Image (cartoon, rainbow, N blue to C red):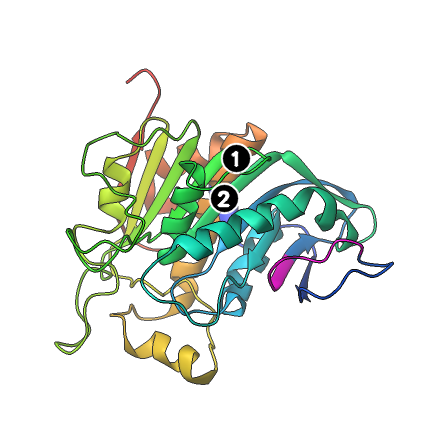
Amino acid sequence: MSDARQVFEHGEHNVRLLSLEPKAATGSSPSPPPKPLIVASPTEEGEYPTLVFLHGYLLYNSFYSQLLRHVASHGFIIVAPQLYSVAGPDCGAEIQSAAAVVEWLADGLIHVLPEHVRSDLSKLAIGGHSRGGKVAFALALGHAKTTLEFSALIGVGPVDGMEKGKQTRPPILTYVPHSFDLKMAALVIGSGLGELKKSPLFPACAPKGVNHQDFFDECRPPAYHFVAKEYGHQDMLDDETSGVRGKATYCLCKKGPSRKPMRAFVGGAMVAFMKSYLEGDTQFLTAIVDDPQISPVELSTATSLELGN
């Protein structure tokens, strides 16, 4: 077995990040995206599995650039839409917008990838952070129909509202154990500090009753749950997030000592999970479950629900 820790480091591929706007169709771009996008992809010739990754509440997709680079460097294409600039409590519109981006992939993605780089849409994952994690679960559960089928689901700190009984619409959690009929493997990542308030003036960023633990409890096998003990809900974002919203990411959520270790862990866990369920290479995910100490951050939880158990 190769060193399983390599998933937490930058991979062997060079990566290109491309920002796209939903402009009118042209000869070079006959199928423009329905939403602004960042597309992270390897530059070397090949066909790669693909992940659609959805940003958190009132965050910009650009805040995840370092995380996207990490994952793409291991041989994945990541499409990260900007679903909205301003949004209220109802998630219905962003669920439909995310579905529209997924529908665009089949005809549109090929035109924006580097030369000789192809997307293998038979190996497609959906994922997201915070409210984007909730939207990813909503798509996986069929709240919006997509022609393409997902093979894996990733929730990074998924949040379903303010607290139990105050879920944002449409509510995803049912509070019935193993009730999610996902038909795919799921990875849920949480943060130990996410459920703690930074200040009495603001709610916790990932409150108990609507957070990662509740999402994992409703998953069926195969499912995985990792929790970074001393890190916060937004600690996987870029080291520098600019503007008013960027500065708010440092102020509103209780946070760990730095973002780099948490980002390396989240990126590595995502890579290990997708290698297992999109490529059939189980060694890295198995290694994290069997020996959580290989993680760059201390894990308070490293749990798996296996088929047949």
User: Horizontal placement of 84 versus 182: left or right?
Assistant: right
Residue at left 62%, top 57%?
34
Residue at left 18%, top 69%?
203
Q: Position of residue 54 (x, y in %)?
A: 48, 55
- Marks 2 & 1, CB-CB < 8 Å contact: yes
Q: Position of residue 131 (x, y in %)?
A: 36, 57
Residue lying farthest to the left in this orientation? 200
User: Horizontal placement of 17 versus 1: left or right?
Assistant: right
Under circle 1, the secondary element is loop
Q: Main secondary structure of the magenta part?
A: loop
Which amino acid, mark 1? Phe
Magenta region includes residue 35? yes
Which comes sooner in the sequence, label 2 or label 1? 2
Residue at the spot of label 2: 126
Q: Position of residue 279 (x, y in %)?
A: 58, 31
Q: Position of residue 80 (x, y in %)?
A: 56, 57
Would you say residue 75 is visible in this rendering?
Answer: no
Which amino acid, mark 2? Ile
- Position above or below: 49 against 79: above
